[in-house]
Amino acid sequence: MMWQGLLRRKHYYLVMFALISIAVVAFSFIVYKHYERIQARNDAALYEYEMIRLSRVVVVDLLDMETGVHAYLISGEPTTLEAYMVARKMLERDLSGLSGLILRKDPESAGDLYLWIERIRAFRKVLDDQIENRTLERGQAIQLKTFEKQTKEMANIRRLIETNTVKRLIKVRLQAAEAKVERSNFFYTVVIGNVLLIGIVLMGTVTIINLETEFQNRLAAQEASQQRYREVTEGINDGLFEINFLTDEFYCSAAYKAMLGYGPDEIANEAQVMRNLIHPDDRADSDAALRRYMDGSDPVYRNVFRMKHKDGGYRWILSRGVGIGDDFSSFKTMIGTHADITEQKQREEELRQLYADLETFTYITSHDLRSPLVNLKGFSKELELSVTDVTAALKPYEAKFKPEDRKVLDTALKEDIPEALGFIAKGVERMDSLTRAILDLSRIGKRVFTLEKVDAQAVFDKCIGALGYDITHKGIAIDCQPLPTLVTDPIALEQIFGNLLDNAVKYLRPDVPGRIEVSVRETSNDFIFTVADNGRGIDDVDKPKVFEIFRRARNTTEVGGLGLGMAYVKATLRRLSGGIWFESTIDEGTRFHFRLPKRAAVTEPVTPPADDIRVSA
Amino acid sequence: MIINKFDAQFTLVMIEDDAGHAKLIRKNLERAGIGNPILHFDDGQKAIDHFFNNGLSDDQNKEQHQKSLVLLDLNLPHIDGYEILRRLKGDPATRAIPVIVLTTTDNPREIDRCYELGCNVYITKPVEYDNFSDAIRKLGLMLAVVQVPHTVMK
């Protein structure tokens, strides 16, 4: 959860940084392009300026040359030609500078240059001609003609150069105007770029702040849940352990150690140390249970063993855990809890002891209590036989007895002794049926139920058949809904129906025609059967005792019975995961309801105490 | 019903701690016409002594065992009926002696246990005396025709 959050955050950051980088690079590129353009325009302006300057210089050179020639023409002094020669050299130099610049920067306009040079050469030729004319003292007419030619050429050149200069000046002006537009464009670019960048950075910052807040919240939630987890594990007093099977790392909580009487630092956090505390007799089994879980043959890990307490005694520990790994077969770690179940074990032991006592008790009732009954019954019978023998033996001598003796003998032999024997016999019979009843009841717990598909209708009909005589004799009306089929123990169902019907028939009111109604209701898991009669009903004071053994309602004294049936039914239903309850109104009737699962799950019969009660999943 | 006295020469060894029961069994066996000598022990130890620590030679013992039939109650002081049954059926010298368990318990588990230990017949003593007499009478009838083994397997 936490590392997933981190991963997501990391992605956000990366995307953010990538965006900002791209934006910065793009922006720089745009700015650089702008700069390049401005630079180029600058260069062009400089070039134009240089061109204008150089062409001016050329014009000045030409003027100097003209002036030098004029001076010579007027004076005729060869020294005056000095200035002309200097200007002529200067012109050569400046022209080569000019042509170099043009060829370097603007080869396309070289055509103009050649035109100029041609014209300049022609002009120079005219000047040279003038000098020659003067030197050779040619006629006035020739000199005048050449002068005209010179003036014409000079005007030509100056026009050419001026035109060019004006062209260049216009170009420079246009470029200046363009530069102005571009400057404002550049300004907008910078503004927009900055706005975008700031926007991206702002967005990124906000996202990061949001993520950071979310992360903090999540951390807080995690902290809270961990806190809760800690409180729970500490609160329930269960010890916590975590073991790493790969690295043998082991962790156990303070409660884990406290359970064995140790303080947090009193015993090492080592799996081997803890394993050594397990009772030697339990080690193999506990290892086996762990192995069964590890190899997947047990779906859950649940282990019970004894661990040595600091006080030297042993505590019963219930260990539960889950493996953590890629799949079931490759657990890397296991995390789980230890619970001290010593008290539970002691109670189990007590229960087992109680059960053993009960076993002894039922044995005593079945054998030891019945043994004396055999004697009572047997010897009273023998006594009876003896009395018969005595009576028969006395018969011949009857006449010889005195009347009062005869009366005593008669009373004793024919009334008192038979009456006494009769009471003894009845008492013994009752005692015998009571012990038998206790025995039967105790055996329900041990009976092994066999679950099978049972047609309740067939079982019910069989029970009705068994009561056939009473039903026809007393004229009882039986009204039975169709009964379902369910999975249960057939004998148990027969006993339940038998007892309920038997009671319904037995406790009808003598003066009212009997009517027994049987119905069934289905719920999601169970069938609820109802046996209703219009009999004498159960008094409110007797209601709590209905399911108690040997208890009978007081309005039933003239009907024979032990008070065992309902206790038996209740115990049987409990074993079959069912239940029984009733409603009753005195002198109106009783409705018994019993619930049976559609598919019974039998609680195991109580097994004799076993020494090894290890719970292993 | 007139039944001829059954005089086959074997002794009924009755191991029964309740003197009353012993008397009633004896009475009813007599009524059933069983006139064999009856040796009565009211204590498990005495019965064990009779079979195993009697100071007799092997031959005498063999002779004695060949003429014995045991009527055994289960609930006895000191050594109980199961132990006696186990000893009798566990020892080759006494294994062939027929043992009839006659007791008040009708618990199926105990009945099974007795048969597992090798008892030959298991009879429950009914509390109802008519049934009791009937059971003993039938036992008597059975004893009248029963043949005890004459060679005791070693």
Image (cartoon, rainbow, N blue to C red):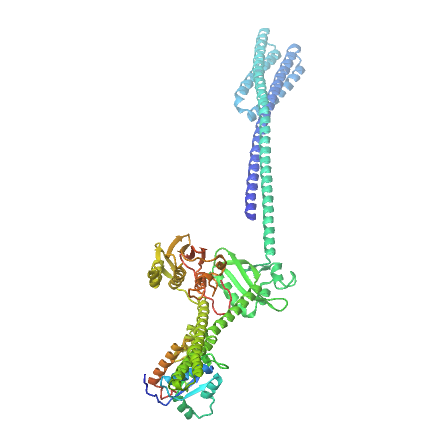
Q: Position of residue A279 (x, y in %)?
A: 57, 69
Figure check: A153 above or below B128: above
- The furthest residue to the top: A141
What residue is drawn where x is 54% and y is 47%? A4
Figure check: A175 above or below B104: above
Inspect this view and state whether residue A4 appears.
yes
Side of A279 where A566 appears, left or right: left
Figure check: A90 above or below A381: above
Side of A34 where A580 appears, left or right: left
- The furthest residue to the front: A403
Q: Position of residue A32 (x, y in %)?
A: 58, 31
Please identify the quarter of the rendering in which residue A492 is found.
bottom left
Q: In front here: A181 or A311?
A: A311
Q: In front here: A314 or B9?
A: B9
Inspect this view and state whether residue A245 appears.
no
Q: Position of residue A39 (x, y in %)?
A: 59, 27
Please identify the quarter of the rendering in which residue A127 is found.
top right
Q: Position of residue A31 (x, y in %)?
A: 58, 30
Side of A573 where A457 appears, left or right: left
Figure check: A479 above or below A414: above
